[in-house]
Amino acid sequence: MKSGCGEKDDFPQRQFVGYFDLTDPRYSKTVFTAIRDMDGHDVGINGIVVYNMGGTYYAFDLMCPHEKKPTCSVRVNAEEDTDFAVCECCNSKFLIASPQGDVVDGPAGRGLQRYKTSVTSDGYLVVTSSY
């Protein structure tokens, strides 16, 4: 993860817990994005992107860590490459098929904001902020 000298982490913080039924077709894909969980509760700052790597889930905020604006989100192109997300404002590119959401190209100085994930015994993905 890249980090500028003296750069502080001023990414917005919001506490949440989101639940996703992994048998639901919306959430059973390799990659999905959500602004709200299955119960309608907001998740993340700009929403989240979840990557499923063979049953290991990585969840990141959709807000670009470089732009930090509600109008600047990263997007995944499911038709081209689901391993990466690109900011629609600054064109920073992030590897979401990794535990850290590392920046691989562009002006962003750090990877995507990561959230904790766990899977319950009854098949629900739980995504939580760790603040």
Image (spheres, rainbow, N blue to C red):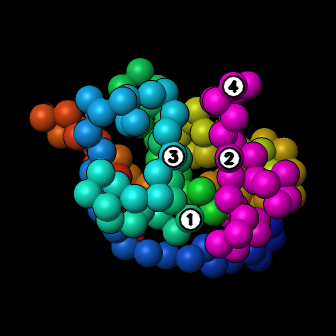
Q: CA distance from mark 4 to mark 3?
A: 15 Å
Residue 95 on image: x %, y %: 67, 38
Q: Residues within 10 Å of mark 1 (few under 14, many from 20)?
A: many
User: Taking 38 as reference, is 120 left or right?
Assistant: left
- Pick whichever of labels 1 and 4 is earlier in the sequence: 1
Does the magenta-highlighted stretch encompass residue 114?
no
Q: Which residue is mark 2?
A: 75
Q: Which residue is mark 1?
A: 46
Q: Are marks 4 and 3 in contact (CB under 8 Å)?
A: no
Q: Nearer the viewer, residue 111 or 2?
A: 111
Residue 29 on image: x %, y %: 45, 28
Question: Label 3's element?
Answer: strand
Does the magenta-highlighted stretch encompass residue 70?
yes
Quarter assignment of residue 61:
bottom right
- Pick whichever of labels 1 and 3 is earlier in the sequence: 3
Residue at position x 57%, y 36% from top?
A: 98
The amino acid type, in three-letter code, at marker 4 is: Glu
Q: CA distance from mark 3 to mark 2?
A: 9 Å
Residue 118 on image: x %, y %: 28, 43
Residue at position x 41%, y 21% from top?
A: 54
Q: Which residue is mark 4?
A: 79
- Pick whichever of labels 4 and 3 is earlier in the sequence: 3
Q: CA distance from mark 1 to mark 3?
A: 10 Å
Q: Which residues are magenta?
A: 64-91
Q: Are marks 4 and 2 in contact (CB under 8 Å)?
A: no
Residue at position x 84%, y 45% from top?
A: 105
Question: Label 1's element?
Answer: loop
Q: Nearer the viewer, residue 2 or 106?
A: 106
User: Taking 87 as reference, is 29 left or right?
Assistant: left
Q: Which residue is mark 3?
A: 33
The amino acid type, in three-letter code, at marker 2 is: Arg
The amino acid type, in three-letter code, at marker 1 is: Asn
